[in-house]
Image (cartoon, rainbow, N blue to C red):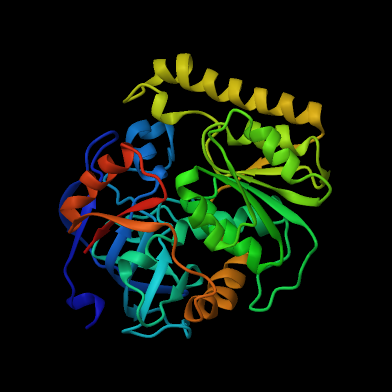
Amino acid sequence: MTPDTLTNQAAWARAPFADLSLGPAPVTAPGPGEILVRNRAVAINPVDRYKQKMGNLMFGWIRYPFIFGYDLSGEVVAVGPDVTRFRPGDRVLGVAIGMDKPRNRAAEGAFQQFTLVQARMAAPLPEGMSHAEACVMPLALSTAATGLFAPEHLALSPPFADPVDQGKTVLIWGGSTSVGCNAIQLARAAGYRVVTTASPANAALVRRLGAVEVIDHYSPTAVEAVTQALRGVEVAGALAMGAGSAAACIAVLRHCQGRRRVALATFPIDIDGLPPRPGPGTALTRVLPAMIGAGAGLWWRARRGGVTFSVIYGTALAETDLSRVIFEDYLPGALASARFVPAPEPLVAGHGLEAVQAAIDRHRQGVSARKVVVTL
C-alpha cells in the first residue's frame, strides 16, 4: 500500500464558524522526518472547538478549507526517506501539528483518514493498548511536558525510567484534566513529589497516577489547604489548568519556599463565555478587553506576590530537542512497562469522521476526567 494508491476522506472546516463536513481529501506522501498514519481514533481538545467558535480571531494564519485536529492513533502506512524509528504496520500515537503556524497545512490535521505526522511527535503503542485509549494522550502529554520541562516554563529535570528523587514538590492545579493526568505522571517520572487538586469524585484517579496529596478545588478554602500542604517543602513551580487556576496558583506560591513560577495551560479568559461568531466589533468591545483585563490582573497579582508566570503553547516542543526526550527516549519504554498509562479514560462519542462534529458538540457540554474520542 503506497500513498498514491490510497483514497482519503476528511472532516473539513470549509469556512470560519462552520460545522465540519465530510469530503474527499488528498493523500500526501511523507517527506523527510514525516510518517503517514492511517488513523483509527482521534480525540477532541478544547482548541478544536475554540477555533471553530472564534473563527479568524484564533490561528488567523489558517485559510479555509482546512482540517483541524491534534490527537490521533493508528498505523503507519509510509515513512519519509530519513525516518528509521518507524516502519509500515507500526501502531503509533501522534500529535498532528498542521494547525501550528510553522506547519499550517491540512495534510497534517488529525480529522481525516490519513494524516502526515512529524516522526519526532509520535511514539509506538505497546501490545494490548487500544487506539481509543492511546489517542487521549498526544496533545495533553505534549502540553504537560512543555510546561514542566521547557526552559521558558518550569525547567524541571526530564523524566527517566528510574527517576532520582529531586527533593522538591510540583503543584498541579487541575489534576484530573487531560493535561493534569499526564503532568502528574511526568512529574513523578522526573523525581518530583506532586500535590494536586481535583474534585472528590476524581481524587482516587489522581492518586493512582502518583499524586501524594489531593485537595478539593471546589472547596472555598482550597487555596489555604494547598498552601498548608506545601508548607515546609521546596516547591519547583506550579502547572495551572482550569478556570481560575492561574490566580489560585499565584495566591498559593506567594507563600511558598522555592521557585515561584506558574505555567498556564488554560486560556486566561473564558472563551466559552464570549459571544459566538465574533466579528471585528466584538473583538474590539469584548475579546480584546477581556484578554487585556485578564492578563493585567494576573500580572498584578503575580508581581505583588513575587511570582512569575508563562503561557504554554502545547506543541512548542516540536521545534526543540524536548520532543525527542519525551516521544523517543521516555514514552515508548514507559508505555510498554505501564509506568505511564493513558489517562483520563476515553469517552467514545461516535464512530467515523461524520461523528467528529457531534463529538466537538459533546465536548462543549463539558466532561470530567474523560476525553472525548471518535473511533475510525
**Residue closest to the eye, 221 or 301:** 221
Q: Left or right of 273: which side holds 311?
A: right
| Picture mark count | 0
Relative to residue 98, is residue 40 drawn left or right? left
- Could one spot residue 285 in this view of the protein? yes
Q: Is residue 109 visible?
A: no
- Residue at left 53%, top 59%? 182
Residue at image location 80% in from the left, 26% down from the top:
304
Above or below, 58 against 214 in this view is above
Q: Position of residue 349 (x, y in %)?
A: 23, 52
Q: Is residue 6 left or right of residue 137?
A: left
112 versus 48 height, above or below = below
Q: Residue 274 falls in which quadrant of the image?
A: top left
Task: Tell me if residue 94 comes above or below residue 290 in the rendering.
Answer: below
Q: Quadrant of residue 318?
A: bottom right
In the figure, 207 relative to 27: above or below? above
The image quarter in which residue 292 lies: top right
Which of the pair 203/12 is nearer the observer? 203
Q: Position of residue 290 (x, y in %)?
A: 53, 21
Is 364 in front, or is 176?
Answer: 176
**On the rendered image, what quadrant is the N terminus found in?**
bottom left
Residue 308 position in % (x across, y down) = 75, 38
Residue 361 as seen in the image, left or right of residue 367: left
Quarter of the image that includes the C terminus: bottom left
Residue 359 drawn at (x, y percent): 25, 47
